[in-house]
Amino acid sequence: MSLRTGLIRRLAITAAAVALAGATAVTPAVADDEWGSSGGDPEFSSDDATDEFGARGDYRDPRRYRGVVTADRLILRSAPARGSRPVRSVHRGDVVSIFCKTPGQSVQGNPLWYLLTDGTWAWGAARFIDNIGPAPRWC
């Protein structure tokens, strides 16, 4: 094997390892979330109340947090920084499910970011999401 072939092979392996590490760092694992072992939709139960925004959820349960988007269009990202890869976007008035909060790049003086769990795991700047109920837990 030539020196060039070995170098290319090592670069390819390194790139694959970095991509895998990045994917696992951004996507949190859930081993046993204990949400709704009775079947059906694990995020909502028939007992849950609906608030003034139409969001359902029992806010006494610390694993369930909600927020309403205050920006016209909020781009959700792969990491808690404005320079990270865009994942999707949400719009003013959308109610989002918040998993946890973490410090990240400051947006208009607010360094907090929320990890949202609505279909895809993505980060949204807390500056543009108002809590419905209690503040989310730390990641």
Image (cartoon, rainbow, N blue to C red):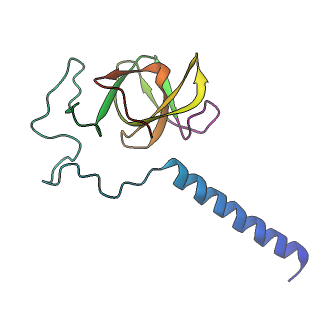
Image quadrant assignment for residue 13? bottom right
Q: Position of residue 111 (x, y in %)?
A: 56, 25
From the viewer's side, name the closer residue of 78 and 5. 78
Q: Main secondary structure of the magenta part?
A: loop
Outermost residue, right side:
3
Q: Nearer the viewer, residue 25 or 62?
A: 62
Residue range corresponding to the magenta coloring: 77-87
User: Residue 63 in the image: x percent, y percent?
Assistant: 29, 40
Q: Residue at x 46, y 20 (%)?
A: 128
Of all residues, the one furthest to the bottom in this rendering is 1
Residue at x 22%, y 48% (from the top left corner): 35
**Per the image, is 119 magenta?**
no
Is 9 on the left or on the right of 34, as rendered? right
- Residue at coordinates 85% horizontally, 83% vertically from top-left? 1
137 in relation to 68, above or below: below
Q: Quadrant of the C terminus?
A: top left
Left or right of 113, for residue 20: right
Q: Residue at x 48, y 24 (%)?
A: 74
Foreground residue, 84 or 107?
107
| Place of residue 70 in the rendered image (x, y in percent of width and height, measured from the top left) | 42, 16
Q: Nearer the viewer, residue 82 or 31?
A: 31
Measured as percent of width and height from the top left, residue 31 is found at: 34, 58
Total marks drawn?
Answer: 0
Left or right: where 98 falls relative to 74: left
For residue 80: magenta?
yes
